[in-house]
Image (cartoon, coloured by chain):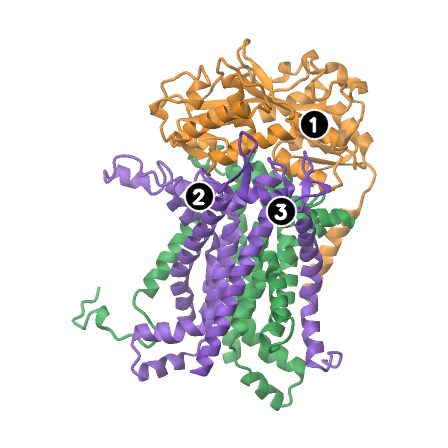
Chain colours: A purple, B green, C orange
Amino acid sequence: MSDWLPRSAAGRRWLGLAPSYFVIGIFMLVPMIIMGVFSFLEPNPYGGVKPVGSMAAYVKLFFEYDLEDQLVFNPGYINIIFRSFQLSFGATLLCLVFGFPVAYYITLQPENRRNFYIYLVTIPFWTNLLIRTFAWIIILGRGGVIETPLLAAGIIEDSLRMMYTDGAIAIGLTYSYLPLMVLPIYASLEKLDFRLLEAASDLYANRLEVMTRVVIPLCKPGIIAGCILVFIPCLGAFIAPNLLGGGKKLMLGSLVQFQFASARNWPFGAALSMLLLSAVVIMLIFYARAAKKRAAMEGDG
Amino acid sequence: MQKSSSPRKSKKILPVGHYRGLGGWTVFFFIFLYLPIVVLIFYSFNANRMVMNWGGFGFEWYLKAFQNEDIQKAVWNSLIVATVSTIFATAIATIGALVLARGGNFRGKTVSLGLITLPLMVPEIVTAVAVLIFFSAIGMNWGLGNVIIAHITFCIPFAFMPIRARLEGMDTSLEQAARDLYASEWETFRYVTVPLLMPGIVAGAMLAFVISMDDFIITLMVGGAGSTTLPVYIYSMIRRGLTPEINAVSTVLLLVSIGIVTAYWVVSKKSQTDTVH
Amino acid sequence: MKRVLTIFAAATAMLTVGLAKAEGELFIYNWTEYTPPELIAKFEKESGIKVSVDTYDSNETLLAKLQAGATGYDIVVPSQNFVPILVREGLIQKVGVHSLPNYKNLEDRWKKPEWDPEQEYTGPWQWGTTSFSYNSELYSGKGASLKEFFEPNDQVKGRLSVFQTPDEVVSLANIYLGIPFCSEDAKQMKKIQDMLVRQKEYVVAYNSETMSDLLASGEAIITNHWSGFSRLGRLTGAPIVYAYPKEGVVGWYDSMVVPTSAKNVENAKKFMNFMMDPVNMAMLTENQGYGDAVKGTAQYYSDELKSAPEINPPADLKVFFAPTCSPKAQSLIDKVWTKVMQ
């Protein structure tokens, strides 16, 4: 059966990676290179690009022309990017705090019940994100599912004004991306050998120490995968900020969308994406470096 | 009601690795998860035209949905796209993850890792426009095929992450043992590695499916004539206002998926007990 | 494995369906729920042409898609300010709408629109207006002036909703402040920006999706709104009134055009002609509730539609159709909006 496989380890490696390279290389990397080139061109007035080289898109990230046509520093876009990172960070943290114990609980279940729980986690996400977000408006909104009984019972007298706040955005984002956190953590926790926990306990580790010294380090790959899967899509999210937050402040996702649609400035949209891409890549490289360093230190110790 | 004088629950000694409040937390989690779903189903019986304002109980939106060929075609398109892309993306991600987690350290590992996660790091609208330009440049106009290829591409990292997380640190002793017992490479892979990896593969496939079912911008942009999917249909309805018809369709989809899962669960449980006896 | 193969075969079959370009077909690309199925069924029956309808969400999407080279559509339905862009970019073709038999039915008012003076490109679909609506139970005003929207009274504090995209909001601001559309004067645009920043203190949400729901629940007292959409909200029983301010409102006109890459041009012309028949156009208007540009449709309207205030504006209402802005004007609009959204 495996006769046709290459003998050498390197040959096998590249054979295994070939499908990924083929699909992503052609249908993702090439288009992104095109986008990268676009970011250095001039915008065509009505969308698209003109084949004229220009750095204008990158200049626009940091500077603007004021009313006297002077180039001045403009922190506007940087602020938007910063705000989006903050929001994504918050949502990721919430997903982790909320999702980790559940993934852990599922792992504690008998084997045949675990898949059932996993299905239970994913089923709500078979319905459309927009419809789910609308459901949250009904729940949080004026005269909604939460307020109506409280008003009827006389606990509150006026609307709680839960909608169109940062809290509503946080709920919406957490809700949108929870399975992206729970599933990877579960996948990595599931292989946890519970005898290790007992061993730790026998060595007088208390419950907290069992968790922080044994469980969490062992499922760290899952936690990291989950955080990446939540954090990055959150950066580009626009449905929750717009529908639940009231869209009062631009987020990165809406800003990029805006450049390709209304503003018809494709190079600037492309430049923004390149900036986002590099920020994420730099973050990941720093993380990889730190992880390597720590691994090396632990190896020494 | 049984009255007991035994020590209260809080004094019961929990086994190692169990924590107080985990069950309660999970219940709360599932309430959070399903509350919007309950609301969504409830409002599918709304007689009112507006999704969010209750106007009495009625089945009319179900009737409408069953008569609406466009919406049915959109649902069908969505299911085809999600199923095909999940299968391909999961398969590609699985072998990719095996190489990257088991292949030791080799030149190009970090680059490969970056490439596989690339679709994740680019905002959707950018991917959408870029892929559309690329498809047009090479003259690819396969209708739904364009959508499927784009979906396979961006589903790969979502399937990849849980599988790789599962593989990381998973020891190879069982596989080693199988090889020692003269199992062929394929047999070892089929009967040892894949079952060990299964929770990761299931999680990855689930993520890919969910992501594909929900995608809107990329589908809207790269889809050719005849490839409207359910999310595209729903988002484009906004200018006229969403109607409970969408809730009705979502409810039917939910019931079907719950039905499939339940059937699968019953069958697999039965086959398990059959093998035991 | 077998299952995988079956699914793969099914997918391949779908692909080939996508590839097939048989004669007697028509691919329409339109906003969702903007093409009544019964109308398509009638056309298919009368002409024997098989129609397929796909949907998009905005003019911007349509433009971006055509610009990036999407093909396969025979009829698309852009708004008036996108028609000159599509013409200039060579994305749509002349089909000689003026020489179609039913062209005589077009209302004279719409025969030489500024976006297509020769009537070479555009066949009528629907037109309507953009203004604001209010909840008449919660609001004491009468919607008589755009001041109530841009500089509202304290009753509306934290209960105002504005569209999420700048174009129509800025156009309304132009009308209110008496600044010409697509102004390239930075000082004039600064005035608009200052006003929108002050208005923001009253805004609960920037929203182009759930205006009627906001009004019905009382979350908002005044919202930006479209005429026909506002009528749908009112028909559900909510106390929603569409305002006709004295300064005027923004108008929009969606029309059928044929992309340059269309493969079934003759069928597209047949469909355009079909739509200029009053019986058929009345079907569309009845379904959509905006307004049409064809003579003799009103006799087929239902009584409710005939008397709906949203499509029967006061006779002296000023309706301004926004033209296509120059790149410089457009970039000023975007600058203003980005500042408001800080």
Q: Can you tell which of label 3 and label 1 is closer to the viewer?
A: 3
* Side of B264 relative to C7 (left or right): left
Residue at (29% x, 41% y) in the render: A149
Q: Which residue is the site of mark 1?
A: C83
Q: Position of residue A65 (x, y in %)?
A: 56, 35
Q: Nearer the viewer, residue A235 or C329?
A: C329
Q: Can you tell which of label 1 and label 2 is closer to the viewer?
A: 1
Residue at (48% x, 28% y) in the render: C193
The furthest residue to the top: C316
Q: Chain of mark 2?
A: A
Q: Secondary structure at mark 3?
A: helix
Q: Nearer the viewer, residue A204 or B272?
A: A204
Q: Secondary structure at mark 1?
A: helix
**Circle 2: is it few (<14), some (14-19), or many (20+) Cα within 10 Å?**
many
Query: Disc 3 versus disc 1: distance between alpha carbons?
Result: 26 Å
**In the rendered image, the vertical position of residue B212 relative to residue B103, given as above or below:** above
- Residue A106 visible (yes or no): yes
Q: Secondary structure at mark 2?
A: helix
Q: Chain of mark 1?
A: C
Residue at (75% x, 54% y) in the render: C13
**In the rendered image, the vertical position of residue A126 relative to residue C44, given as above or below:** below
Respond whether the residues carrying marks 1 and 2 are from the same subunit: no
User: Toward which corner of the image does residue B85 lie, by quadrant?
Assistant: bottom right
Q: Can you tell which of label 2 and label 3 is closer to the viewer?
A: 3
Residue at (44% x, 76% y) in the render: A192
Query: Disc 2 versus disc 3: distance between alpha carbons?
Result: 34 Å
Q: Which residue is the site of mark 3?
A: A270
Q: Amino acid at mark 3?
A: Ala
Q: Which residue is the site of mark 2?
A: A135
